[in-house]
Image (cartoon, rainbow, N blue to C red):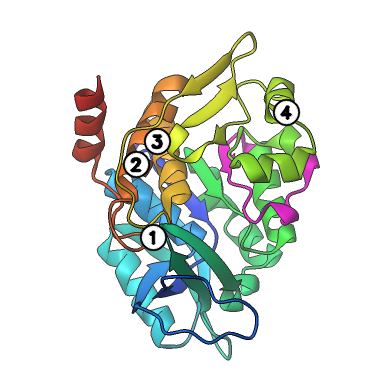
């Protein structure tokens, strides 16, 4: 099966984002009038799946939604985005996950209610062991149960399937997983929270494995001899929601297509810079030709 296509399997959360745009974040006890409201498909897992699929990746999603309107809408949307949804389960008597996103001054604060995402359990992953084993790359995040993440990592390690772990939310990351994953992609704050040391020192502990995203500044890793900082791209940000997920989906796409690490990170930076130019986590995720144009134009 690997010879037939380059398959990226994303295991993770599928949410509906409930987006409120405000001039200023309210303080405790304060009621304010918002400027805009919208719903938008989200969830870090689904976002990363769409990001890779938009780039012409062959993407399969493993996850759970509720038997509700949001669940039906999200599965239909993923199918529309050319993500294989055959391993997304509808869970009865459980709400689909939601993320409440508050946007103010080009920044965001997010409250996630996991819902059906926490019904993706170890037994379900074990039953899909062959599907995971046939993958050329697995991408996972931490908006699902820790034991589920552990099971996915164990299967990938056993079957020698490369894995990108995006440690968000970082509080759920177990450092013991570092010995069994290929890439960890925290942002600066997550890196500090996980390793409790300066970014430079953490990078040197995990050469060519730890890639720290730096927002508009790009991303950085240590190649075993030197610190490699891959610059970001100038952009006019409208909504940063989903930029990190775009980075991870694009990184997975680039790596399975045999880009070397520095070129893969550059490609992911370019994709992320495009994603922030539209409202919504998935709306601005770019096509492959747009990423290539941005890289060519900057060069």
- Mark toward the viewer: 2 or 3: 2
- Mark toward the viewer: 2 or 1: 2
Q: CA distance from mark 3 to mark 4?
A: 21 Å
Q: Is 209 part of what is drawn in magenta? A: no
| Image marks 1 and 3: residues in contact by CB distance under 8 Å | no
Compare residues 272 and 214 and report the one nearer the observer.
214
Mark 3 closeness class: few <14, some 14–19, many ≥20 residues within 10 Å: many
Residue at point 65%, 45% (across, down): 189
Region in magenta:
159-176
Q: Is residue 3 visible?
A: no
Percent x, y of residue 99 = 51, 72
Q: CA distance from mark 4 to mark 1?
A: 29 Å
Q: CA distance from mark 2 to mark 3?
A: 9 Å
Q: Is residue 153 visible?
A: yes
| Image marks 2 and 3: residues in contact by CB distance under 8 Å | no
Report helix, strand or loop for mark 1: loop
């Amino acid at each position: 099966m690997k010879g037939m296509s380059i398959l990226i399997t994303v295991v993770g959360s599928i949410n509906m984002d409930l987006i409120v745009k405000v001039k200023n974040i309210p303080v405790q006890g304060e009621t304010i009038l918002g400027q805009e409201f919208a719903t938008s498909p989200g969830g870090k897992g689904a976002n990363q799946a769409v990001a890779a699929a938009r780039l012409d990746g062959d993407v399969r999603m493993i996850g759970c939604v509720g038997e509700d309107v949001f669940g039906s809408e999200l599965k239909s949307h993923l199918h529309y985005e050319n993500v294989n949804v055959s391993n997304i389960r509808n869970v009865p008597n459980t709400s689909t996950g939601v993320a409440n996103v508050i946007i103010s001054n080009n920044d965001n604060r997010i409250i996630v209610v996991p819902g059906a995402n926490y019904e993706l359990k170890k037994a379900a992953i074990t039953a899909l062991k062959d599907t995971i084993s046939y993958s050329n790359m697995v991408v996972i995040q931490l908006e699902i149960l820790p034991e589920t993440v552990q099971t996915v990592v164990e299967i990938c390690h056993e079957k020698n399937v490369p894995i990108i772990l995006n440690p968000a939310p970082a509080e759920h990351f177990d450092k013991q997983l570092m010995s069994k994953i290929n890439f960890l992609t925290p942002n600066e704050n997550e890196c500090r929270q996980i390793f409790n040391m300066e970014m430079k020192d953490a990078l040197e502990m995990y050469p060519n494995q730890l890639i720290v995203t730096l927002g508009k500044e790009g991303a950085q890793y240590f190649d075993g001899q030197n610190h490699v900082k891959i610059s970001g791209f100038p952009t006019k940000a409208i909504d940063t929601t989903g930029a990190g997920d775009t980075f991870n989906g694009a990184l997975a796409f680039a790596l399975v297509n045999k880009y070397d690490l520095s070129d893969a990170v550059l490609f992911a930076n370019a994709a992320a810079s495009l994603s922030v130019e539209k409202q919504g986590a998935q709306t601005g995720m770019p096509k492959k030709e747009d990423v290539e144009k941005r890289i060519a134009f900057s060069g």
